[in-house]
Image (cartoon, rainbow, N blue to C red):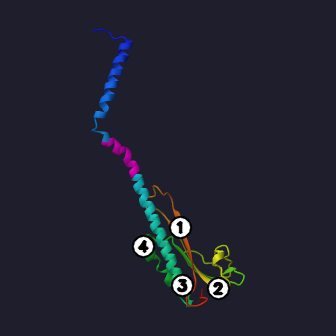
Amino acid sequence: MRQLTMPEQLTRFLQFGRSLALRFPLHERGMAAVEFSLILPIMVLLWIGGVEVTQGLSVDRRLNNLCSSVGDLVSRTKTITKAQIDQIFDIAPGAIYPYSATSLQMRVTAVKIDGSQNATVTWSRSEGGTAYSKTQNLNAVVPETLRVANSQIIMSEVNYTYTPAVGYVITGSVGMSDRLYFVPRLVDSISCSDC
């Protein structure tokens, strides 16, 4: 057997490579497995992210409904007491179910708008957080368009710390809050004697 020269070895190597390259597209047995292994991590990441974002939006929608319900129930009264407000706050676990209500904070505040359109606290009640102090200025909180001279508005607020179940796409806790304003329906001003 004769020894091949370097150019002959290179020529044979290139011919082998060319024949292998021409045969490779004809072998499709493992292509589906390779494509699946490349796509699977991306699909799993999208699925987990979709679940986390959907749960976060669900919590946000429930908080909006809770904030609306608390403010609406208070604005339908003529006078109210601390005990009645606490009973209204008791709807929270049912309104936010199936999520935990342990990090939920609720606050309802009667805001007096004087003749100069300054917003000050008439009374405030909170659960899980702190209430506003009486006569505290709320000009920075109440939008100017809602400050109608010589009126009262009811401000309902909720705050919640959402922690995703998986925590892979949304890492850490996310603070969510909502604030809604209501006009007293039956009287010009709702009083709370013991707030």
Q: Is residue 38 magenta?
A: yes
Region rendered in magenta: 32-43
Q: Position of residue 168 (x, y in %)?
A: 45, 55
| Direction from residue 106 to residue 18 in the image, left or right | left
Residue indicated by mark 4: 97
Q: Residue furthest right?
A: 116
- Three-letter code for the amino acid on which mark 1 is drawn: Met
Q: CA distance from mark 3 to mark 1?
A: 22 Å
Residue indicated by mark 2: 151
Determine whether label 4 and label 3 are within 8 Å by CB.
Answer: no
- Three-letter code for the amino acid on which mark 4 is drawn: Tyr
Given residues 88 and 110, the one toward you in this image is 110
Q: Earlier in the sequence, mark 3 or mark 2?
A: 3
Report the mark closest to the observer, 4 or 3. 3
Element at badge 2? strand
Q: Earlier in the sequence, mark 4 or mark 2?
A: 4
Q: CA distance from mark 3 to mark 2?
A: 16 Å
Q: Main secondary structure of the magenta part?
A: helix
Residue indicated by mark 1: 176
Element at badge 3? helix
Q: CA distance from mark 1 to mark 2?
A: 29 Å
Q: Earlier in the sequence, mark 4 or mark 1?
A: 4
| Direction from residue 38 to residue 124 in the image, left or right | right
Determine whether label 4 and label 1 are within 8 Å by CB.
Answer: no
Residue drawn at the location 36% of the way across and 17% of the way down: 11
Residue drawn at the location 52% of the way across and 82% of the way down: 72
Element at badge 4? loop
Q: CA distance from mark 4 to mark 1?
A: 16 Å
